[in-house]
Image (cartoon, helix red, strand yellow):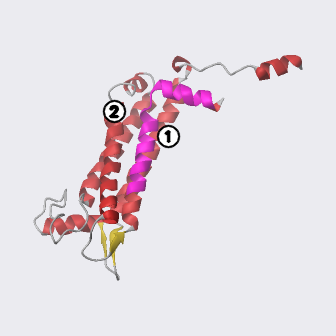
Amino acid sequence: MAKHAARAGRPTPAVTAAEVPDASIARSRGIGAVVAIAGALLMIAGIFLPWLEYTGPRRISGWRVYQDHVDSGGNGFVVTRMFSAEATSILITGFTLLIAAILVILAALWVLGLARKGGLGLRRLEGPVAFPAIQLANLALGLAIIDLVMVMAGDHAEPVQAGPGLYAVVAGGLLACIGMFTAVRTRRGAAAAVQSEH
């Protein structure tokens, strides 16, 4: 009994990066990639939900912002009339965010494929793959936040508030960032997570 008490009192030895099994790393990266994909899909759903809600029944989705801007001669990516009397309070169109979300999905699928390969695939994720993958998710979130802030803090010609689509896009972007960070975190970070579990 004294032996068990002595063992219970001993601190758990630190887990080094080299001691974390590839299977544990691969599982962590796989879960992160799936979460990133789920976040990107939520962003895509939000693009087709109302972004702008005016007084009365009028609502405009992120995709409608894109269509209206293209129909009026705009480029489809950025609302260039934002400082004119016709401003829609939106800077980044739904089409731009759709592209960003699709790129996040492709990056997450790539990470998921490398993680499943184990060994060499996992080592590749320790290198230059991590930075662009995380920054891609950060970009998608940043673009969504810009539009939400512009609607909430802008000086509008008529009463308007942010619709559920904008909140869904921001929430999806945040989820994509968390997932991608988990998917490409370093082996040292995984070791710290394993240590905390013990």
Depth check: give the residue in front, 134 or 159: 159
* Start-end of magenta stretch: 170-196
In the rendered view, would you say 51 is above or below 3?
Answer: below
**Residue 156 position within the rendered picture, expressed as x and y whole percent measured from the top left:** 26, 71
- Please give the name of the residue rendered at 17% of the width and 64% of the height, measured from the top-left corner: 83
Between disc 1 and disc 2, the foreground one is 2
Crowding near the residue tagged with mark 2, few <14, some 14–19, many ≥20 C-alpha atoms within 10 Å: some
- Please give the name of the residue rendered at 27% of the width and 65% of the height, measured from the top-left corner: 63
Is 97 in the magenta? no
Crowding near the residue tagged with mark 1, few <14, some 14–19, many ≥20 C-alpha atoms within 10 Å: some
> Which residue bears the numbered disc 1?
31
Main secondary structure type of the part rendered in magenta = helix
Given contact means CB atoms under 8 Å apart, are the residues at marks 1 and 2 in contact? no
- Please give the name of the residue rendered at 39% of the width and 55% of the height, measured from the top-left corner: 170
- Sequence order check, earlier mark of 1 and 2: 1
Which of the 4 quarters of the picture holds residue 92?
bottom left
Whether residue 23 is visible to the viewer of this picture, yes or no, is no
